[in-house]
Amino acid sequence: MPNGFPAVAAAVIVLTAARVSDAEGSNLLIPKTETTRMDPKFNGTSQNVTATVGRRAVLSCTIENLGTHKIGWMKAEDQTILSFHERVVASNGRFKVNHENHRTWYLTILDVQKTDKGCYMCQVNTIEMQKQISCLDVLVPPDIITDESSPDLTLMETENATLTCNATGNPEPRITWKRENGQPLLMRTGTRDLITKHNTFTGNDLKLWRLDRRQTGVYFCIASNGIPPAVSKRITLSVYFPPVIAVPNQLLGAPIGTDVTLECHVESYPKSINYWVRNRTKMLMDGPKHVLRETISGYKAAYYIIIKMFDQTDVGTYNCISTNSIGSSEGTLRVYELQGDIPIGKSSKNKVARSSACPKHMHIVTVAALTAAVWARAIG
Ligand SMILES: *[C@@H]1O[C@H](CO)[C@@H](O)[C@H](O)[C@H]1NC(C)=O
Ligand SMILES: *[C@@H]1O[C@H](CO)[C@@H](O)[C@H](O)[C@H]1NC(C)=O
Ligand SMILES: *[C@@H]1O[C@H](CO)[C@@H](O)[C@H](O)[C@H]1NC(C)=O
Ligand SMILES: *[C@@H]1O[C@H](CO)[C@@H](O)[C@H](O)[C@H]1NC(C)=O
Ligand SMILES: *[C@@H]1O[C@H](CO)[C@@H](O)[C@H](O)[C@H]1NC(C)=O
């Protein structure tokens, strides 16, 4: 009778057990209570570990009553066996295993690598496998990813620029922006035209809306995450614009026989080529008759021509012309002979002055004192 068979078999086993129990005075089928207490057992909970790349990390587990059982360390994610009892299995020489009295077991990782980050299992080979998991976090100093960061940039004034820096590291690095030589960062806030000054800016993207010529310069993005060293990248921003000329004195009257200084100011980036022409025909060269001077500071320059021993042939229209790769600009100055040879002004040396003789339709912007100062500077 097929249905009855399993029931009979079960009964036989129960009977056998009862007989053994009777014969020995103890039950062999159920482990002794003493043995249960002596089974290997982890003492305490696992501890997570943090180590900086290149340093060493030590993971541990404490097991009571190990007896003849064995301890193994494994990488949790891919179940790679790293050590079996006192023997290191990992081919990589950076792993070491040791123990204190077969009770506390250590897995030491030398020269910790980023890839060592993860969880590790301390296993005991009991029938019902026991394990304890410790996780290793690897701290990595920041590193700027060049491919994901801005190169040097050249843009036109009024265009928008975004300077970007991306860095790896653990914890995730923070990006701070600064300008060279402690210059402030100039930024437009929101949609307003107002440009405000900031010592630093924090964030991966430094957005510069409607570029201004004053934003030309060297920028540094600094990546830091508390794990030294912090690193930085240098980005040069060039804001190009065509030359813009300003003429302090457009009309100059000079007595015969004196020296006359003509002056033009230009803002330009890239730097402009600056020169003078007379009567729209002749380019004036540096020499005994015409002394040319130029002073440059950043994107600003001032340039001068000194007409030596002014005479009637020097009367006429002079143009200062500035040209760069974006465009060109010119300023116009008129020089006339000052009759009556008494210049107005405090300085007797002043060779240029206001004159009542100048034509009424011309706008007079001559400032004698300024011209005298320029004169002194130009002569050196
Ligand atoms: C765990 O370890 C501590 C000391 O490290 C010891 O006092 C305690 O008895 C241990 N616990 C067990 C269950 O063995
Ligand atoms: C150890 O780290 C793992 C992974 O980061 C986390 O899940 C676990 O809660 C941590 N354990 C302890 C005891 O902090
Ligand atoms: C910077 O890195 C983040 C995360 O890896 C990425 O999502 C982002 O696109 C990167 N930025 C640039 C500009 O590459
Ligand atoms: C610059 O950015 C602003 C705000 O995003 C936008 O309105 C403007 O059109 C941009 N200008 C240029 C020249 O792309
Ligand atoms: C320049 O033009 C002025 C006025 O037209 C004239 O008097 C002067 O002789 C000219 N000078 C030269 C060198 O051509």
Image (cartoon, rainbow, N blue to C red):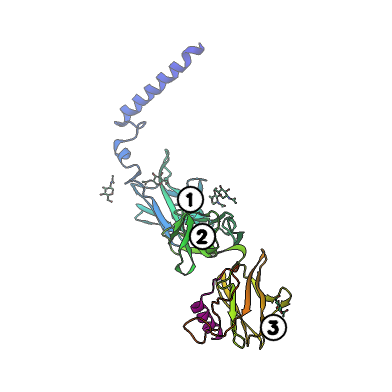
> Is residue 194 depicted above or below 340 in this figure?
above
Residue, disc 2 = 143
* Lower position in the chain sequence, tag 1 or tag 2: 2
Mark in front: 2 vs 3: 3
Q: Which residues are magenta?
A: 364-380
- Is 230 left or right of 326, judged from the image as shown? left
- Amino acid carrying label 1: it is Arg
Q: Is residue 41 left or right of residue 147?
A: left
- Rendering coords of residue 116 (x, y %): 49, 54
Q: Position of residue 42 (x, y in %)?
A: 34, 45
Q: Residues within 10 Å of mark 1 (few under 14, many from 20)?
A: few
Q: Is residue 350 above or below residue 188?
A: below
Mark 1–mark 3 distance (CA, rounded to whole Å)? 53 Å
Q: Residues within 10 Å of mark 2 (few under 14, many from 20)?
A: many
The residue beneath circle 1 is 192
- Per the rendering, the mark at residue 313 is 3
Q: Between disc 1 and disc 3, whose residue precedes?
A: 1
Q: Are marks 1 and 2 in contact (CB under 8 Å)?
A: no
Residue type at mark 2: give it.
Asp
Q: Residue 379 at what x, y percent from top left?
A: 55, 86
Find out if the beta carbon at label 1 lies less than 8 Å from the nearest ligand 4 atom: no
Task: Give neighbour class at mark 3: few <14, some 14-19, many 20+ (Cα, 10 Å).
Answer: few
Between discs 2 and 3, the one toward the N terminus = 2
Q: Position of residue 110 (x, y in %)?
A: 46, 61
Question: Which part of the image, by quadrant, shows the C terminus?
Answer: bottom right
Q: Main secondary structure of the magenta part?
A: helix
Q: Looking at the image, which residue is at 50% across and 64% down?
A: 232
Residue furthest right in the image: 281
Evaluate whether residue 149 shows in this view. yes
**250 and 344: which one is in front?**
344
**Mark 3, secondary structure of its residue:** helix
- Tell me the distance, in whole angstroms, between the alpha carbons under discs 2 and 3: 68 Å
